[in-house]
């Protein structure tokens, strides 16, 4: 891995700053998407992370004719 993953150890403590800036969820139905978002928000909150609404977007579509 790159040198950015090998933090310096000032005074015996390890400091790491990592940006995770892309999350993609794929769901078959709106209720499934809502459940997945709720689960994800709970999980992120459990590790003290949060989403910025201004940086979030959603795309939806329907299945083409003749497909399930």
Image (cartoon, grey):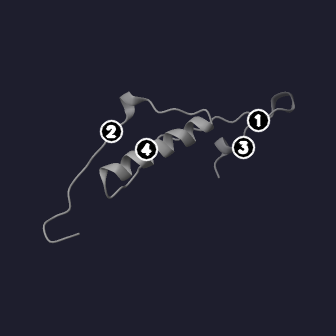
Res 17 seen here = yes
Residue matched to label 4: 37
Res 19 seen here = no
Q: Label 3: how many residues lie within 10 Å, few (<14), some (14-19) or many (20+)?
A: few
- Side of 13 where 52 appears, left or right: left
CA distance for labels 3 and 1: 7 Å
- On the image, the x and y values in percent for residue 68 come to 23, 69
CA distance for labels 3 and 4: 32 Å
Residue matched to label 3: 6
- On the image, the x and y values in percent for residue 49 come to 56, 34
Residue matched to label 1: 8
Q: Secondary structure at mark 3?
A: loop
Nearer the viewer's eye, disc 3 or disc 2?
2
* Chain-order first, disc 2 or disc 4: 4
Tag 3–tag 4 contact (CB < 8 Å): no
Residue at screen point 56% across, 42% down: 43
Q: Give the number of the disc on residue 57.
A: 2
Q: Secondary structure at mark 4?
A: helix
* Chain-order first, disc 3 or disc 2: 3
* Chain-order first, disc 2 or disc 1: 1
Q: Nearer the viewer, residue 6 or 67?
A: 67
CA distance for labels 1 and 4: 35 Å
Residue at screen point 20% across, 57% down: 62
Label count reads 4
- Side of 54 where 49 appears, left or right: right
Q: Label 1: how many residues lie within 10 Å, few (<14), some (14-19) or many (20+)?
A: few
Tag 1–tag 4 contact (CB < 8 Å): no
* Chain-order first, disc 3 or disc 4: 3
Tag 2–tag 1 contact (CB < 8 Å): no
- On the image, the x and y values in percent for residue 2 come to 64, 48
Nearer the viewer's eye, disc 1 or disc 4?
4
- Side of 30 where 41 appears, left or right: right
């Amino acid at each position: 891995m790159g040198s950015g993953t090998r933090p310096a150890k000032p005074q015996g403590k390890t400091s790491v700053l990592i940006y995770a800036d892309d999350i993609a969820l794929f769901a078959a139905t709106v209720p499934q998407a809502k459940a997945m978002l709720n689960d994800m928000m709970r999980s992120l909150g459990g590790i003290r992370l949060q989403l910025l609404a201004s940086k979030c977007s959603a795309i939806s579509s329907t299945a083409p004719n003749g497909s399930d």
